[in-house]
Image (cartoon, rainbow, N blue to C red):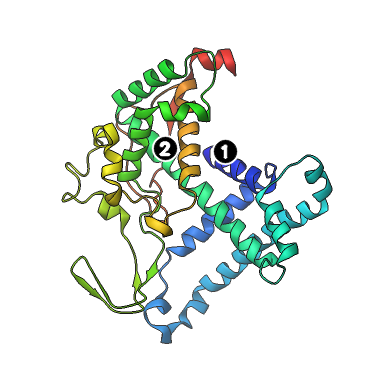
C-alpha cells in the first residue's frame, strides 16, 4: 500500500498519471537492491572477475537493466504519442520539461540521459519514504504514548471536519519530531552515496589519500553515544524547541551541503502527509502483546527484517469523510 502511494505520487510528477505496471516495476527495483548487496569477489580481486560469470550476477544485472530501460522508454514514448493532449490540458510534468530541453539541446538531453534522471527520481522518491514510514509506524507502535500524542495533535490542529493536507504540516510539531527521531534511529539509506577524495585530506584523525572512495556511515553517526545521549533510545525531546537545527551537522539522513539529497523536502511531505493521514483516520495497535521486532534486514536501504504487521480500525472521521 505504501509503495503504491509513493510510486503513484512520483509517477504523477514525472508523467502526469498513475502507472498501471506498478507491481512489475517495484519488483525490478527490489531485485536491483538485492543484487547490490550480493558479494562480488571481483570488487576485491580484479583478477577474479571471471568468477562472477559463473555466478550469473552480471547477467542478472544486465537483464534487469534492460527491463528497467524498456519501462522508462515506454513512459517517454507514451508522452510523445499524447503530447498534444498533455499540452492542451496544461499538464506540465518532469518528462515534458526534459523533452522540451531535448528540442533545444539534443546533443545533451538524449533519451538515455532522460531515462537516467527518471530512474534516479523514481528510486529516490519511492524507496526512502516507504522505508521511513514503515520504521516510523513501528517505532510508534512500540511507543503508544507518542502515537496518542500525535492523534491529539491532529485532532487539535486539523479537527474532525477535514482531512490532513500539506498546509497543516508546519503546525504538527510533535509529528515532525517523531519523523526526525525515526530517521535518526532508522535512516532509510544507512550509507550515503560514495564520495571520491579529490586530494589528500584528513578526516576524523585519519589520513585519506587522493582518489580514495569514502563511505559516510550515517547509521553509526546517528547512534554515536558521543553525539547523542541515550543514543539507542527513542526520545522525542531531542528535537523539541528547534533542537533539530542545532544538531543538523550530526543528523544526516539525506546527506549534507551541496551534495545532499534534492528530494529531501519532497520526502518529508510524503511521509508527513501519509503517516499523519493514517493516524488521523485509523486506530492502530500491535497484532499481539509483544513489541514490534525492530531487527534490520540486509539491503542497500535499511529494510526491516520482518515487514510490519499491525491491526487498524477506522475512526469516526474516516467514516465521516471517506
Q: Which mark is residue 111?
A: none
Of pointers 2 and 1, the one earlier in the residue sequence:
1
Residue 184: x percent and y percent?
31, 45
Towards the viewer: 288 or 116: 116
The quadrant holding residue 247 is: top left
Q: Is residue 62 left or right of residue 243?
A: right
In this view of the protein, can residue 82 be seen by the observer?
no
Look at the picture and state if 247 lies above or below 286: below
The C terminus lies in quadrant: top right
Towards the viewer: 190 or 29: 190
Picture residue at 60% right of the left edge, 41% below the top: 9
Q: Residue furthest bottom?
A: 47
Picture residue at 73% right of the left edge, 42% below the top: 91
* Label 1 CA crowd tier, 10 Å (few <14, some 14–19, many 20+): some
Picture residue at 49% right of the left edge, 49% below the top: 263
Q: Are marks 2 and 1 in contact (CB under 8 Å)?
A: no
Q: Is residue 251 left or right of residue 121?
A: left
Q: Is residue 295 left or right of residue 279?
A: left
Residue 165: x percent and y percent?
53, 27
Closer to the observer: label 2 or label 1? 1
Q: Name the residue under label 2.
A: 308
Check disc 2 and report its element: helix, strand or loop. loop
Residue 233: x percent and y percent?
22, 39
Q: Is residue 59 left or right of residue 144?
A: right
Q: Mark 1 points at which residue?
A: 5
The quadrant holding residue 182 is: top left
Towards the viewer: 107 or 145: 107
Check disc 1 and report its element: helix, strand or loop. helix
Amino acid at each position: 500500500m505504501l509503495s503504491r502511494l509513493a510510486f503513484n505520487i512520483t509517477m504523477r510528477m514525472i508523467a502526469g498519471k498513475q502507472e498501471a505496471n506498478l507491481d512489475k516495476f517495484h519488483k525490478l527495483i527490489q531485485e536491483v537492491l538485492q543484487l547490490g548487496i550480493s558479494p562480488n569477489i571481483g570488487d576485491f580481486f580484479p583478477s577474479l572477475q571471471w568468477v562472477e560469470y559463473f555466478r550469473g550476477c552480471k547477467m542478472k544485472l544486465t537483464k534487469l537493466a534492460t527491463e528497467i530501460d524498456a519501462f522508462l522508454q515506454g513512459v517517454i514514448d507514451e508522452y510523445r504519442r499524447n503530447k498534444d493532449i498533455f499540452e492542451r490540458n496544461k499538464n506540465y510534468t518532469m518528462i515534458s520539461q526534459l523533452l522540451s530541453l531535448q528540442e533545444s539541446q539534443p546533443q545533451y538531453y538524449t533519451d538515455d540521459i532522460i531515462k537516467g534522471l527518471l530512474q534516479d527520481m523514481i528510486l529516490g522518491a519511492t524507496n526512502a519514504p516507504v522505508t521511513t514510514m514503515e520504521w516510523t509506524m513501528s517505532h510508534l507502535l512500540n511507543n503508544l504514548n507518542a502515537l496518542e500524542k500525535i492523534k491529539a495533535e491532529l485532532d487539535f490542529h486539523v479537527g474532525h471536519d477535514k482531512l490532513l493536507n500539506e498546509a497543516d504540516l508546519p503546525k504538527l510539531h510533535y509529528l515532525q519530531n517523531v519523523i526526525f527521531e525515526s530517521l535518526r534511529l532508522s535512516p532509510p539509506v544507512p550509507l550515503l552515496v560514495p564520495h571520491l577524495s579529490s586530494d589528500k585530506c584528513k578526516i576524523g584523525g585519519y589520513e585519506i589519500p587522493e582518489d580514495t572512495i569514502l563511505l559516510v556511515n550515517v547509521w553509526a553517526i546517528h547512534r554515536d553515544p558521543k553525539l547523542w545521549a541515550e543514543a539507542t533510545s527513542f526520545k522525542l525531546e531531542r528535537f523539541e524547541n528547534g533542537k533539530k537545527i542545532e544538531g543538523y551537522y550530526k543528523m544526516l539522513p539525506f546527506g549534507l551541503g551541496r551534495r545532499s539529497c534534492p528530494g529531501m523536502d519532497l520526502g518529508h511531505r510524503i511521509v508527513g502527509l501519509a503517516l499523519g493521514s493514517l493516524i488521523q483516520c485509523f486506530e492502530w495497535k500491535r497484532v499481539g502483546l509483544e513489541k514490534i521486532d525492530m531487527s534490520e534486514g540486509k539491503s542497500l536501504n535499511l529494510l526491516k527484517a520482518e515487514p510490519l504487521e499491525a491491526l487498524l480500525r477506522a475512526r469516526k472521521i474516516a467514516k465521516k469523510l471517506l
